[in-house]
Amino acid sequence: MPIDYTSRDFASVKSDLVARARATIPEWTSTSSPDFTMMLIDLWSYVADVQNYYIDRAYTEAYLDTATQASSVRAIARLMGYLPNSRTSATTTVTVSNSSGAAITIAKGTRFLVPATGSKAVVYFTSTSVVTVAANSNATVSVAEGREVSETLTSNFTGDGGASFPLSELKIVPNSLTLNVGTTAYTHNARISEVGSTAPAFTSVTDSTDTTRVVLGNGVNGKVPDAGSTIIANYRVGQGSGGNVAANAITTMSNPVVSISIASSALASGGTDPENLSSIKSNAPALRRIQDRAVTLNDYKTLMLGFSGVSKAVALSTVSSGAVTVNYAALPTYSNYQNIPSGTSTLHLTEAAGSPNFGPAGTDIHNNMTAYLQNRSMIGVTVANISTTINLTDVYVAFNSVVVKDGHYQEVVKSNIDAAVRALFSWSNIDFNTIIRLSTILSAAQSVEGVQSVFISNLGASSGGTSVADHTPTATTSSAISLPVLRTITFAGVSGGIA
């Protein structure tokens, strides 16, 4: 009797076993539940059902397209050479006031916080440098989101290459990691395969449970610490995008300093969560396909998106006297971009006074991206960063007619239209050189519950404009980076519904 290998669940396996038994032992005719043979068949069917379930799951998790578990997706991505974007800390500044007649020093690592509320946990920020506040004066303190932790990984290192140690805390911000190996400071490098054998560097791996392991050098990539060394890890535990708090949200010092008070705090930005699975599934195969080299401009874009922390990238080429230059821009995530303050005209990749920046992720990109791309370029091609300043080009939307359906409140409908349109201008939905379609905005507004009809009187770069066509924002060129930003949404001629 042939075996049907497609029988994989309890019912089909049981049916096959009964048919097999009847063919082999024709004198057996009882198939009732109390029968001992039926009990054995039920047990075997149960075991087969469970085994086939795990076989199917193992097969499913072995391929990137079908994997559903974070651990599987991240492991396969690493095999492809892709480094998923990790959690980053938001950064901001706090203005402190000294009411005493003497200068007071605010130490590095001083903890500031956003107090907990009924629905949100406390958010910690720590100062990143020493600041002296003059008598009867104010001073600005740069802070990064997260609670600082220091722990001893070993007091007697074995000297093994590639050794790893789990860290005791969850939700670690990898780019905040440093190691003290005896008296030597080891730095974190997400691309450990690119450092030399004597470089005091290490890397880290975060699994699906959000547990992070520190991985030391192996003597080929990264120096192996001396046997007997004491290794101490220092890092921040952060909340990712939860650290992008509003202006003046930081109101307290964990350990208050006499005569020092918090006058204000700026909007915090740059905090991001670990890359989601759908993004990893999209980016990892693309990076694998180009085989770690850049020939076309799309190859450069793919390489940049494979660089840890990058969420948006563009590459342009220029030719002068036969020499080719690839100009690029690569940016980390900027959270809450659709609600960026109206007075903000530029973003800055690195720390810059008066211009919001992308925190440590932006600094890493600024410091290392050019060399990363140059090493993967064809001979004779020069790679250059376009700029560290991102110019924000204005977009204004004006509705001159909104008809609300009966039974719906006008204010609620307007608020929901506002949210729907702003979502189109979130960081994940805007890009370099993207045309803003009038039909897309109308469709988003029309999809709001309670809307009967909507009409737009202006979509353009001027608040008083009358354009009702698709809007083309300022393009990114080989010398300037531009991104569209939504400034205002206005409403006129709202009718119907409940006023």
Image: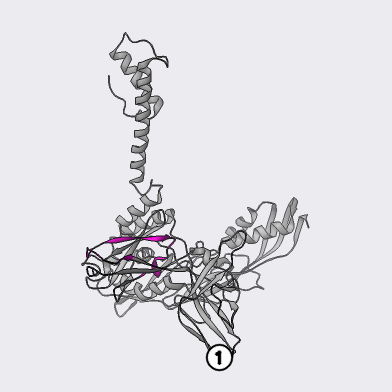
Residue 118 image offset from top left, x and y in percent: 62, 59
Residue extending farthest top: 27
Query: Residue 416 location in percent, x, y?
Result: 66, 58
Residue 312 figure quarter: bottom left
Q: Residue at x 74, y 57 (%)?
A: 410
Image-based side of 48 in relation to 341, left or right: left
Magenta stretch holds residue 21: no
x and y percentages locating residue 157 in the rendered image: 25, 65
Task: Give 201 or 365, whichever is nearer the viewer.
Answer: 201
- Within the image, what quadrant is residue 318 found in? bottom left
Disc 1 target residue: 102
Task: Residue type at mark 1: give it.
Answer: Ala
The quadrant of the rendering that contains the N terminus is: top left
Q: Which residues are magenta?
A: 153-178
Mark 1 surroundings within 10 Å by alpha-carbon count, few (fewer than 14), some (14 through 19), many (20 or more):
few
Residue occupying the far right of the picture: 499
Secondary element type, mark 1: loop
